[in-house]
Amino acid sequence: MRDREFALPTAPTPSQGGEKQRLRDKKIKDLLPNTRRLVEVPYTASLSHTMNALVANHVVAVPVAAPPGQWIGAGGSMIMESDKHTGAIRKHYIGMVTMLDILAHIAGDDQMNDDDGTDLDQKMAVPVSNIIGHCLEGLSLWTLNPNTSILDCMEVFSKGIHRALVPVDSHMENVSGVELVESATSYRMMTQMDILRFLKDQHGPEMAAISSLSVRESGALNPNVFAITDRTRVIEAIKCMKAALLNAVPIVASGVLEEDHSQLIDGNGRKLIGTFSATDIRRCHLSALRQWLSASALEFTEMVSASPTKMVSASPIHRGWPGSGDPQREQVTCRESTPLREVMDKAVDKHVHRLWIVNSDGLLVGLVSLTDLVRMLRASLLSS
């Protein structure tokens, strides 16, 4: 099992002292009481059932459970749940399915009917096990040992892994790090957002110094931002996100030049007017989604914004910008001069996984994702 671990740095000795040492001494198990119970679906669940589970529990990803001995786990993983009293294996977690996986399946092989979505019911009736691995993150399933340090966990989460299972009472040897093999009686989910929420609540001098840095000073800014326009339809936006493995894209105002509204464009220097996210789709009844597929993505996000606590069930009234007259959703943005403290507050309070960076005219200059934040915060803690 050891040869399956990532090579992770050794924790410092107690003599190093200070807040840095205290943060290093914090373990994943210290955060478990603040994480929620594990939400999962059986391998036989339809995509419709899986969507219902995502909506009901306000999550964007769920592990898929199957009987032991019948499947090979994603990436060769062997993540098992065992009986607390007998130790007998009860289930095998064979993979993780996210909203992006479901979107990729909806987009399919470009044969989907763009006009009325008549094959949507058929697509959503397939077993969830059929779509595991549609997107890159689903190709592997990871666990983090409870004794893994926060900084080691941050290294994992800075490399494109957004979440991992944590055994509450591991039966494996007492090691730290990320594993493909695990057996435990129960698990919790640890995410990038959990780590960011923990760091946001640290008020010692070291975190205070790091969080006072601006987006520009910290190096967290990613200048590569791909966007769709206000004329891009929902089905086209879904296909774009599938192709680029993006969970969300900014919506920008159409330019004066002729451009292909069915493709991603360079969003730099364009006016931000909306955001289309994978999580928006889970808020829409399938019966309504069938009609919304050919509407503009901007109009769809306005409908979602107008009913923040309800499922979208209404069909689009008419097509294209400026939509149906509903108020635009407030965009979660910041400037290059914004302190990281404010960036972290917005990400956690608004529960978003990226913030768009705009200038004084509201034009896009980049983005900051949770992966960017975790990577930068870890590097700053190690070098301070």
Image: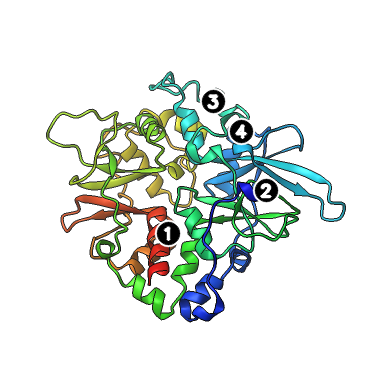
Front of the two marks 3 and 1: 1
Sequence order check, earlier mark of 1 and 2: 2
Distance from Cα at disc 3 to Cα at disc 1: 36 Å
Sequence order check, earlier mark of 2 and 3: 2
> Which residue is outermost to the right?
86
Please give the residue where the numbered disc 1 appears in the rendered image: 374
Sequence order check, earlier mark of 3 and 4: 3
Image coordinates of residue 39 in percent, x first then y, are: 63, 49
Q: Are marks 3 and 4 in contact (CB under 8 Å)?
A: no
Mark sitting on residue 1: 2
Q: What residue type is labelled 4?
A: Val
Q: Are marks 4 and 2 in contact (CB under 8 Å)?
A: no
Residue ID at (61%, 46%) = 4
Q: Is mark 4 on a helix, strand or loop?
A: helix
Q: What residue type is labelled 1?
A: Val
Mark sitting on residue 94: none
Please give the residue where the numbered disc 3 appears in the rendered image: 123
Position of the C terminus, as image quadrant, is: bottom left
Image coordinates of residue 329 in percent, x first then y, are: 33, 51
Please indicate whether residue 244 sits to the left or right of residue 129 in the image.
Answer: left
Front of the two marks 4 and 2: 2
Residue ID at (79%, 44%) = 90
Please give the residue where the numbered disc 4 appears in the rendered image: 128
Residue in the foreground of this view, choosing between 123 and 317: 123
Q: Which of the 4 image quadrants contains residue 370? A: bottom left
Front of the two marks 2 and 3: 2
